[in-house]
Image (tube, rainbow, N blue to C red):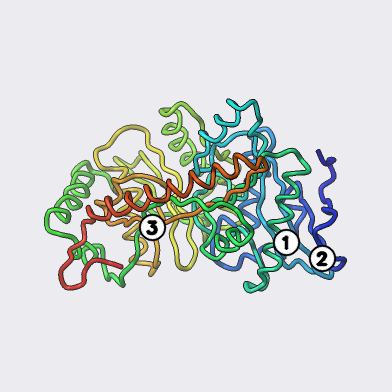
Amino acid sequence: MYGRTRCRKIPGRVSALIKVTVNDEIDAIAGDDWNALVGDEYPFLQHSFLRAAEQSGSVSPDTGWTPRHLSLHRNGELCAAMPLYEKSHSWGEFVFDWAWAQAYERAGLSYYPKLVSAIPFTPAQSPRLLLKDPSDHDSAGTLLQAAIKLAEDTDCSSLHVLFPTQTDMQICQDQQLKIRKDCQFHWRNQNYTSFNDFLQTFSAPKRKKVRQDRRRVVDAGITFRRMHGRDLDEAAWRLVYQLISITFMRRGSMPYFELEFFTSLGATMPDNVLVVFAEKDGKAIAAAVFYEDSRTLYGRYWGSDGYYDALHFETCYYQGIEYCIEAGKQLFEPGTQGEHKIARGFAPVQTWSAHWLRHPEFFAAIGEYVTEEARHVDRYIQAVDDHSPYRNDNGKKPS
């Protein structure tokens, strides 16, 4: 293994004018320099987000996420970077490779540690190869080769690039990584003027079902209040965290992120965080946490103090759609999995991951596996799309 120094130059692979460094914490890279590569989109890629995850202890060697962020400097200027972690497990990734780990174990090999380029606990598509110049594919390829070299030098079994953009996926493919296909469910704004305008694109039975969902919540005396990060003090965040914790504990675990992570986000990214509270008799009974940028709303965490009919659908989906229409957001990504999203107006979209395994026979076998798996994903997307609630008449079904 490498030593404990925060910054290290990987020998070889690069020219004399290019330096690739492994950074054992995001703070080893200047925040302004990192954010200049990210731009204004993707709040969870911002330096403040990654810093809050690390500083709160949510992302650390103790939780199985050891930072190994790559930075590429050309003539002393940061030109490219890659969020990267050494993992001792596969939790919190949402691209499931447990069967691969079991196959390694049966063969007497160690699958962990492995390297993962991802945003911890955040299954949303965004760039993994951050470039000052989007056309600088040479630097992107250098980052990927440096990540593979790091895996080899640190006895990691593999490199996994999770939820990359289409451009990054193509670069990974050019570098001979195996491409894996999956799907999520997203909502797209077709210039709706109101939630009712959106519902008019549904078939009558599906429209009735959504209205029944919403009526149950209203009849229960539940109301909603939106608050951005700038409006939330520590007491409010404690309440949010308590509600999320209750829901996680019902599933036998604790939230991935610590309370300090949320309070830090509220302070450092006040315009990128939205919380929707559900209230009954003046008391908050549920909350949903979202991230947002100028174009997209991302649904992330949900918690409630008990079961309330249709409340999850209302708080996490309908309130999000309504907010997107009012705020002019074009896209709503509510998270992973869940065919129940189809009836609420979300459509299946392809997502990707890219994989390199050090063991050549397993690498070849994974290639065959993901090719066959992609066929199943395509059939699944078609099957669930056939259950879309949108009308087909008059071009009303969104593309």
Cα gap from disc 3 to disc 2, whole angstroms = 37 Å
Q: Where is mark 3, residue-wise? A: 349
Q: Nearer the viewer, residue 388 or 172?
A: 172
Q: In which quarter of the image is residue 20?
A: bottom right
Q: Where is residue 152 in the image (x, y as percent from the top left)?
A: 75, 44
Q: Earlier in the sequence, mark 3 or mark 1?
A: 1
Q: Residue at 69% of width from left, 36% of height from top?
A: 61
- Identify the amino acid type marked 2: Ile
How far apart, in angstroms, are the residues tagged by discs 2 and 1? 10 Å
Q: How many marks?
A: 3
Q: Is mark 1 on a helix, strand or loop?
A: helix
Can you say which quadrant of the picture contains the N terminus? top right
Residue located at (25% from left, 62% from top) = 195
Q: Is residue 66 left or right of residue 204?
A: right
The disc placed on residue 227 is none
Dot 1 corresponds to which residue?
142
| Circle 1: residue type | Thr
Q: Quadrant of residue 247?
A: top left
The residue labelled by disc 2 is 18
Q: Position of residue 153 (x, y in %)?
A: 78, 43
Under mark 3, the amino acid is Val
Cβ atoms at labels 3 and 2 below 8 Å apart = no
Whether residues under marks 2 and 1 lie with C-beta atoms below 8 angstroms apart, the answer is: yes
> Dot 3: what SS?
strand
Q: How far apart are marks 3 and 1 (CA)?
A: 30 Å
Q: Nearer the viewer, residue 227 or 339?
A: 339
Residue at left offset 27%, top offset 44%: 222
Residue 45 visible? The answer is yes
Mark 1 Cα within 10 Å, few/some/many (few <14, many 20+)? Answer: some
Viewer-proximal residue among 237 and 380: 380
Left or right, 156 with respect to 221, comes to: right
